[in-house]
């Protein structure tokens, strides 16, 4: 299948879980490009899996300077950007009673600010008529206990898709958001205490 032959894609969080699955799917349609993450080991492993047409850039999506570097390096290597997938993100588990300022800022920086600045940093390098894909969550559609803050960040990501679409009409850049349901990825093992993993997955499946 070659529906994306020679298209250049940048996938944040392309070294794990859903992002790696998206990178694989784009590759299978003929795309090439860049995966972004902080863990060099999983970046190397994912690039080996994706093959010669993909490179990894080690960057933190919560840092605007890192995002600017990602797109500069992408343009230097591939000349342009056709697809941006703002996928990097992670939940914070806790209630309005337990989550304080530091976790609030961390959650919003990773799940909301990073999405805005991924697109903002990409735009100077994007072709007219290109495509932006944002990753929301089922947690944005209904309230699950302990996922209020994460759900609020993801609900705002859904709004970003609407707002960016209208902002970018003049350049014919399409903006879509996908809101996955519970998906078995390494995220659960990373962020949920081992004895709570099954319970959390069950809650999110309801
Ligand atoms: N799994 C689910 O059930 C589910 C459901 C709905 C929505 N989602 C959303 O889907 C997306 C992917 O989640 P996943 O389940 O695939 O999780 P995952 O396997 O843990 O992948 C998360 C990815 O984000 C990257 N990342 C995290 N913080 C980063 C940072 N500061 N800078 C750069 N990269 C960063 C990670 O790479 P490094 O660790 O190398 O930085 C990793 O590649 C997230 O936005 C998540 O909220 C997941």
Image: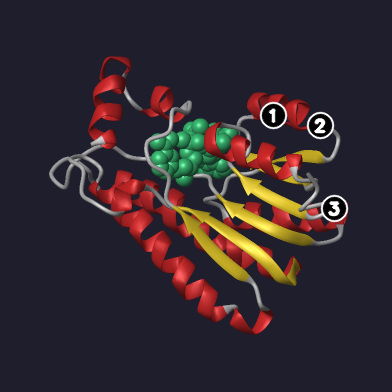
Q: What element does badge 2 sit on? A: loop
Classify mark 1: helix, strand or loop: helix
Residue 53, image x, y percentages: 84, 40
| Residue ranking furthest to the bottom | 170
The CA span between labels 2 and 1 is 9 Å
- Residue at 81% x, 62% y is 80
- Determine which residue is flagged by label 1: 46
Give the Cα separation between the discs numbered 1 and 3.
20 Å
Q: Are circles 1 and 3 on residues that touch, CB within 8 Å?
A: no
| Residue 90 seen in render | no
Quarter of the figure with the N terminus = top right
Counting from the top left corner in percent of width and height, residue 97 is at: 13, 44
Gap in Å between the C-alphas at discs 3 and 2? 14 Å
Asked if the residue under mark 1 is in contact with the one under mark 2, i.e. CB atoms within 8 Å, the reply is: no
- The one nearer the camera, 185 or 115, is 185
Crowd class of label 1 (few under 14; some 14 to 19; many from 20; radius 10 Å):
many
Dot 3 lies on which element?
loop
- Report whether 9 appears left or right of 200: right
Give the labeled residue for mark 2: 51
Seen as rendered, the residue at the extreme left is 97
Position of the C terminus by quadrant = top left
Above or below for 81 versus 62: below
Of labels 2 and 1, earlier in sequence is 1
Q: For marks 3 and 2, give the one nearer the viewer.
A: 3
Other residues around mark 3 within 10 Å, as few (<14) / some (14–19) / many (≥20): some
Residue identifier under label 3: 6
């Amino acid at each position: 299948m070659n529906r994306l032959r020679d298209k250049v894609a940048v996938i944040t969080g392309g070294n794990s879980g859903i992002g790696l699955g998206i990178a694989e799917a784009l590759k299978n349609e003929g795309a090439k490009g860049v995966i972004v993450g902080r863990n060099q080991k999983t970046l190397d492993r994912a690039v080996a899996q994706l093959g010669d047409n993909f490179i990894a850039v080690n960057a933190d999506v919560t840092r605007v300077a890192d995002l600017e570097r990602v797109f500069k390096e992408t343009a230097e290597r591939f000349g342009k950007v056709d697809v941006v997938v703002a996928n990097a993100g992670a939940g914070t588990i806790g209630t309005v009673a337990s989550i304080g300022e530091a976790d609030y800022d961390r959650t919003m920086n990773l799940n909301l600010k990073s999405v805005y600045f991924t697109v903002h940093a990409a735009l100077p390098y994007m072709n007219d008529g290109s495509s932006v894909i944002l990753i929301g969550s089922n947690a944005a559609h209904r309230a699950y206990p302990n996922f209020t803050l994460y759900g609020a960040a993801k609900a705002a990501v859904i709004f970003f898709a609407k707002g960016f679409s209208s902002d970018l009409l003049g350049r014919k850049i399409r903006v879509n958001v996908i809101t996955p349901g519970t998906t078995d990825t390494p995220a659960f093992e990373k962020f949920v205490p081992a004895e709570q993993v099954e319970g959390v997955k069950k809650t999110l499946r309801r």
